Image (spheres, grey):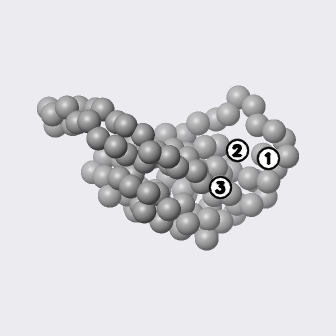
Amino acid sequence: MIIIQTTVGDDKNAKELINLLLETNKIACGTFHTIQSSYKWKDEIINEPEVEVSMYTSEALLREVVDIVKQRHHYELPKITVLEPVYTLPEYDEWVNSSTT
């Protein structure tokens, strides 16, 4: 199991992305929450709220999920990162892997 993370502009974008990936069995679960982001973009310091999205999927679907996120993303340069958990409850790992195709 892996966790793919990105940030989007609002809850609506997060729900749309998660639902698309759930409906196509590319992720088993998606979570999101509002964060406060600060970053430098094109020589300007930006401070704004964003929504961080975590998507739980099988390692075999990494490239496919990343491609879908990139295609659907509204940002010019989206943050897309992949996390590999140090530990996952084996039953949860099995559920994620069996729920994705």
Q: Residue furthest bottom?
A: 23
* Mark found first going from the N terminus, 3 or 2: 2
Q: Nearer the viewer, mark 2 or mark 1?
A: 1
Q: Kindly identify the amino acid type of the residue bearing the numbered disc 2.
A: Met
Q: Say whether residue 71 is left or right of residue 19.
A: left
Callout 1: SS = helix
Q: Kindly identify the amino acid type of the residue bearing the numbered disc 3.
A: Cys
Provide residue 68's location: percent of width, then percent of height: 48, 60
Answer few, some or many: residues within 10 Å of disc 3's Cα (few below 14, many 20 plus, some between 14 and 19): some
Q: Are marks 2 and 1 in contact (CB under 8 Å)?
A: yes
Q: In 3D space, how far apart are the residues under numbered discs 2 and 1 (Cα atoms)?
A: 9 Å
Q: Which residue, given by chain and number where applicable, does mark 3 sit on?
A: 29
Q: Residue furthest right?
A: 91
Provide residue 97's location: percent of width, then percent of height: 75, 53
Q: Kindly identify the amino acid type of the residue bearing the numbered disc 1.
A: Tyr
Image quarter in which the C terminus is found:
bottom right
Q: In 3D space, how far apart are the residues under numbered discs 3 and 2 (Cα atoms)?
A: 11 Å
Callout 2: SS = loop
Q: Which residue, given by chain and number where applicable, does mark 1 sit on?
A: 92
Residue 25 versus residue 1 in the image, above or below:
below
Name the residue: 44% across, 57% down.
11
Q: Are marks 3 and 2 in contact (CB under 8 Å)?
A: no
Q: Say whether residue 23 is left or right of residue 43.
A: right
Name the residue: 37% across, 45% down.
50
Q: Which residue, given by chain and number where applicable, does mark 2 sit on?
A: 1
